[in-house]
Structures are given as structure tokens and as C-alpha cells.
């Protein structure tokens, strides 16, 4: 009886490990497709971005409203909202000596394609 229990346990472990091996990512993270090093600026006086409140924490709220518009929106246009409200560069060390800004703790936490509603 003990041998069959051990065999059953071994088979169960193998099945679980085989299942875990088959677990795959659903694809590339969307942020990894943003080539920030290739960003270009095409500024126009008719485009605007407005965030309120302008400083988080003053209104005792964690929510920010972001309004933006552009006369010529593109699928490549993105809006990013920076957080945290009490950010200090001294509390955001580089992960490695070869790390350069933007660092993980200074990355946008919310992004939105400008052509999406």
C-alpha cells in the first residue's frame, strides 16, 4: 500500500511540474514596446495636457484627472502619469551601477494611448 501511495505522489508531482512547464506568458509586456529612446517631439500650440490636482496629497485624494487633446492624434502618442506623490530621488536608488534614469521607481504608473477614450 505504501508503494502505491508513493507512486501516486510521484506521478502527481510530475503532472504538476509538467503543467507548470506549459504555463507561458501571454506575450510581451506592453511597456516594453515603448521605445522611449526613439521618442521625438512634434510640439504644437494646439495640443495640451492638464492634470488636477497639480500636487497629490494636498486634497487628501489619491486620484488624478488627466485631460489631453491634440489636433493630430497618433496611435504612437502616449500619456504617462508619474507617482508617488511624495517622491524623492534619494529613496530611488539605481538597481545596478549601470542603471540610468528613468528608474523603475520613477516610471509612470498609468499610461494611456492618446487615441483611446
Image: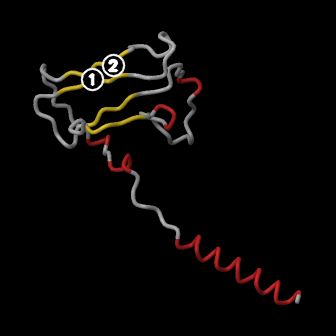
Q: Are marks 1 and 2 in contact (CB under 8 Å)?
A: yes
Element marked by disc 2: strand
Image quarter in which the N terminus is found? bottom right
Residue at 35 percent across and 32 percent down: it is 80
- As drawn, is 71 to the left or to the right of 86? left
The residues bearing labels 1 and 2 have C-alpha atoms spaced at a distance of 6 Å
Residue 113 point in image, percent of width and height: 27, 39
> Can you say whether 108 is above or below 84 in the image?
below
- Res. 67 mark: 1
Pinpoint residue 63: horizontal percent, then vertical percent. 44, 23
Image x and y of residue 57, in percent: 50, 14
**Residue drawn at (60%, 77%) of the image:** 18
Count of numbered badges drawn on the protein: 2
**Position of the C terminus by quadrant:** top left
Q: Nearer the viewer, residue 35 or 113?
A: 113
Task: Report the residue that reaches farthest toward the front.
Answer: 1
Q: Is residue 28 above or below residue 51?
A: below
Quarter of the figure with residue 42: top left
State the image coordinates of residue 53 (x, y, percent, origin top left): 39, 14
Q: Pointer 2: what residue?
A: 51
Left/right of residue 97 with respect to residue 37 in the rendered view: right
Amino acid at each position: 500500500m505504501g508503494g502505491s501511495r508513493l507512486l501516486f505522489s510521484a506521478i502527481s508531482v510530475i503532472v504538476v511540474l509538467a503543467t507548470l512547464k506549459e504555463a507561458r506568458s501571454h506575450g510581451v509586456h506592453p511597456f516594453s514596446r515603448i521605445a522611449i529612446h526613439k521618442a521625438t517631439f512634434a510640439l504644437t500650440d494646439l495640443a495640451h495636457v492638464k492634470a488636477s490636482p497639480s500636487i497629490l496629497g494636498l486634497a487628501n485624494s489619491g486620484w488624478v484627472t488627466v485631460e489631453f487633446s491634440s489636433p493630430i492624434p497618433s496611435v504612437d502618442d502616449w500619456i504617462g502619469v508619474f507617482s508617488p506623490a511624495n517622491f524623492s530621488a534619494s529613496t530611488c536608488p539605481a538597481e545596478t551601477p549601470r542603471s540610468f534614469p528613468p528608474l523603475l521607481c520613477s516610471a509612470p504608473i498609468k499610461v494611456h494611448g492618446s487615441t483611446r477614450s
